[in-house]
Image (spheres, helix red, strand yellow):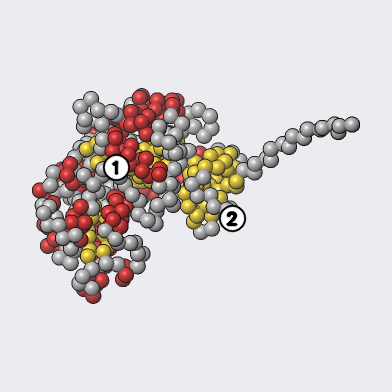
Amino acid sequence: MNVSDSQRVGSALEGLGYHLTTTRGEADVIVLNTCVVRQSAEDKAVGRLYSLKPYKERRPNLVINLMGCLVGVKGSQHLQKRFPFVDVFSPPSDPGPLIAYLTQDESRDFEQEQTDQRFAIMDGDLILPAHERHRLVSAFVPVVLGCSHACTFCIIPYRRGTERSRPVGEITAEVRTLVAQGVKEITLLGQIVDRYGKDIADGPDLADLLRIIHQVDGLERIRFLTSHPNWVTDELLDAVAELPKVMPHIEVPVQAGDDQVLEEMQRGYTAAEYIQLVEKTRTRLNGDFPGVSIATDIIVGFPGETREQFQRTYDLLAELKMDVAHLARYSSRPGTVAERRLADDVSDEEKWERFRALEELQEQIATEINGRYLGKTVEVLFEEEVRGRWKGRTTTNKLVFVESDKSLQGQILPITLTWTGPWSMQGRLLERQPAPISIEMIQPVT
């Protein structure tokens, strides 16, 4: 989501005549886009912000813009006192305050803006920043802004606001605009992406949106993340199964494998129900090789989590054998329900021990799953060249590297996989056999 927000800022600034520089000392405007989903992320953002202070002291005319979840949607007065060297504070997904500051438009009262005004910048006419135009292969498109589910550990609803679905026409227009600028693959984003349309009476759902976007000419691949187990419907799975452009990769966090912990997290399902969902997804989407891949998220060390409860999470992951498991140690976030009601009583040492146990297990699982790809030929969409090798992804979101003297950017090519590891694979371009030459014998005229 922050990558998408940053693209909008870059696009808006270029509209004012600015251009990108990767050197801080050359910049007239520095935008720091922040994430605070974990305490470590917030600490990193604050440290990065303070590192900009000397630049401001040397060049008072430098404009520093703090943006994103550290600012949130409820006002920035406390941040103005804490960071007086910052010129502009922007909520998530809103370049408006920065643009108004640079153009000296003082008519907007950002603390009193309504949500629909704040996100009016998202009108579907997204022009990519110059350095990405006709170079970016895969792009992110937010479809649900904010979140209203309020898991007890999560700070996002308090920083990004309530759930709001963007209109279908606006999203489709943005996808068409991106495709016209060279994008081949789009990923639909939402804190809970499969709740798309739930805030609109009789509105379309995510399955409907996928079917509409699937019709965009020139678009090659569609992905979406992140899903919530409670809203992965049969209709959504049918759309993934039936639409060739929608990739067979589902990201659906479980967070924990113990029912009491799940209840304390306010997740709304049991471990058994999650297992049933994974089995149903695999049954519906597992066709020819490679079938479907499923990724999950897990938090270890949630308040009150005992070793026995953690073992249930470990056992669940061992049973389900997910393609990817994004792991996190619980981090208390001020303002969340968990922070207010539950004591963070699992030691950091214990959290690390549980984290590493799952990490080692997932490495074994991923090694086993990816090993099945060895020697297989798969379709890979190549994104960019990295350290002399071309990087791309399979339909199931497996990372593949290939050596080639020719540019592979933006191409979908058959690749024979020659090496597989837990986190990536290597392959070679499939050698195409030359078409047979047809020779017609003609008798000379006598």
User: x, y (%) of residue 368?
Assistant: 52, 40
For the point 35% across and 67% down, the residue is: 23
Instruction: State the image quarter where residue 262 is shown.
Output: top left
Camera-side residue of 8 and 249: 8
Q: Is residue 205 visible?
A: yes
368 on left or right of 226: right
x, y percentage for residue 185?
A: 42, 42
Q: Of the numbered discs in the image, which one, if any, rests on residue 405?
A: 2
Q: Residue at x 54, y 52 (%)?
A: 407
Mark closer to the chain start, 2 or 1: 1
Amino acid under disc 1: Gly
Q: Is residue 265 visible?
A: no
The residue lying toward the viewer, choosing from 88 and 306, is 88
Q: CA distance from mark 2 to mark 1?
A: 37 Å
Residue shown at 20% from the left, 72% from the top: 60
Label 2–label 1 contact, CB within 8 A: no
Residue at image mark 1: 124
**Mark 2, mark 1: which one is toward the viewer?**
1
* Label of residue 163 in the image: none
Q: Residues within 10 Å of mark 2 (few under 14, many from 20)?
A: few
Please tell me in which quadrant of the rendered image residue 215 appears: top left
Q: Quadrant of residue 235?
A: top left
Please, what secondary structure does the residue beneath circle 1 have? loop
Q: Measuring from the top left, give residue 104's x and y in whole percent.
A: 16, 60
Crowding near the residue tagged with mark 1, few <14, some 14–19, many ≥20 C-alpha atoms within 10 Å: many
Which one is nearer the viewer's eye here, 98 or 312? 98
Quarter of the image with the C terminus in it? top right
Q: Residue at x 22, y 50 (%)?
A: 94
